[in-house]
Image: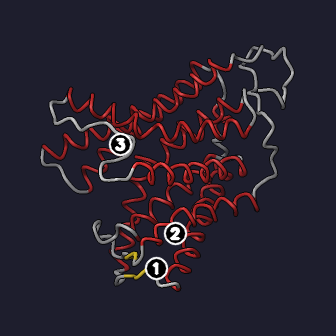
């Protein structure tokens, strides 16, 4: 079976991004509607997460199995034991990197910590983990670092697929705001103006951080061969940031105050450290290589894999 034309492959990879944009935008519109109806707190957040996951996961599985007719393991969905190890590795490397970088920031006087309420912190982390996994970590990794990246890497060199997936990741939040506006209008609610970044965020700073974050996630996924390492990194990143940077607003039981504008560099700093650790301990890979898909059942590939063409 000859390789697909490059435009068709790029379009199919973009479908992964669009699935995530539809899921996230719809979930955000439902969240707004639930708030107007008086549903608040953990219940509303769980509803939002469930809507996002219920849209993104089945659609990607349908595209992969029924449309592409390819096995799910190509997405990086490894066996149970390997998945647990990869997930734990992603969490531990990210949390350890954050502890090291925030520790240095504290020693330099960039961070001041508030009082610790251990029971409240444990409860917050547990509930937030469930919500963050369903709303962001699982659907985003499956659609982007799973489906979009694998689709691109079957046709392009790994480094090209890497850059393309990061680019799709940067487009996702803006596309989600368009979907949110459309769904909000259908639900009869106020329509927020679409934008490249969430309201209140500086678009340039937001997109730079998103690029670093996407690069770290892909590095984890590629060097371990498991999507679950990226899911673990994603979940740990969200947890660390929400506890430290937004802990007071979220009543998380612990929080940090950044005492200098330079302290914003701590977040991309620990992401880069985590990516470096993954490169160090992960399997060796060829960044100029492609990873052609196994042929669909009942078909035979007629062309040999090529590792250098674009």
Residue 269 horizontal side relative to residue 109, left or right: right
Q: Position of residue 31 (x, y in %)?
A: 25, 43
Q: Is residue 264 above or below residue 41?
A: below
Asked whether disc 1 touches disc 3, contact meaning CB atoms under 8 Å apart, the reply is no
Question: Few, some or many C-alpha atoms within 10 Å of disc 3 (few <14, some 14-19, many ≥20)?
Answer: some
Question: In x, y percent, where is residue 222?
Answer: 70, 46
What residue is shown at x 52% (from left), y 78% (from top)? 105
Q: Please give left or right for residue 266 compared with residue 128 in the image.
A: right
Q: Which residue in the structure is indicated by mark 2?
A: 266
Name which quarter of the figure residue 292 lies in.
top right
Q: Percent from the top left, x then y, of residue 73?
A: 67, 36
Residue 265 position, x and y percent, is: 51, 67
Is residue 80 shown above or below 155?
below
User: Which quarter of the figure is the N terminus placed in?
Assistant: top right
Q: Relative to the observer, which residue lies in front, 274 or 207?
A: 207
Q: Which residue is mark 1?
A: 110
Q: Is residue 254 left or right of residue 44?
A: right
The front one of 13 and 89 is: 13
Q: Are marks 2 and 1 in contact (CB under 8 Å)?
A: yes
Residue at figure coordinates x 47%, y 37% from the top left = 171
What residue did someone put label 3 on?
50
């Amino acid at each position: 079976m000859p390789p697909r034309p490059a435009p068709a492959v790029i379009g199919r990879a973009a479908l992964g991004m669009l699935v995530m944009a539809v899921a996230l935008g719809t979930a955000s519109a439902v969240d707004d509607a639930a708030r107007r109806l008086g549903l608040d707190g953990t219940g509303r957040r769980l509803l939002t997460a469930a809507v996002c996951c219920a849209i993104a996961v089945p659609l990607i599985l349908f595209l992969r199995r029924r449309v592409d007719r390819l096995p799910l393991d190509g997405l990086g969905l490894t066996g149970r034991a390997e998945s647990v190890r990869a997930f734990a590795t992603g969490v531990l490397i990210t949390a350890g990197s954050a502890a090291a970088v925030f520790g240095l920031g504290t020693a330099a006087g960039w961070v001041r910590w508030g009082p610790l309420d251990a029971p409240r912190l444990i409860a917050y982390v547990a509930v937030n983990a469930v919500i963050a996994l369903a709303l962001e970590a699982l659907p985003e990794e499956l659609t982007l670092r799973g489906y979009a990246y694998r689709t691109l890497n079957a046709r392009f060199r790994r480094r090209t697929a890497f850059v393309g997936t990061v680019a799709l990741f940067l487009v996702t939040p803006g596309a989600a705001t368009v979907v949110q506006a459309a769904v909000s209008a259908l639900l009869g609610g106020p329509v927020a103006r679409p934008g490249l970044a969430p309201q209140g965020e500086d678009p340039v700073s937001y997109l730079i951080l998103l690029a670093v974050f996407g690069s770290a996630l892909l590095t984890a996924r590629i060097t371990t061969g498991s999507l679950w390492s990226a899911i673990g990194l994603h979940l740990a990143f969200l947890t660390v940031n929400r506890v430290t940077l937004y802990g007071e607003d979220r009543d998380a039981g612990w929080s940090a105050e950044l005492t200098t504008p330079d302290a914003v560099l701590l977040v991309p700093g620990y992401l880069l450290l985590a990516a470096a650790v993954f490169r160090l301990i992960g399997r060796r890979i060829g960044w100029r290589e492609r990873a052609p898909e196994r042929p669909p059942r009942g078909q035979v590939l007629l062309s040999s894999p090529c590792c250098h063409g674009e």
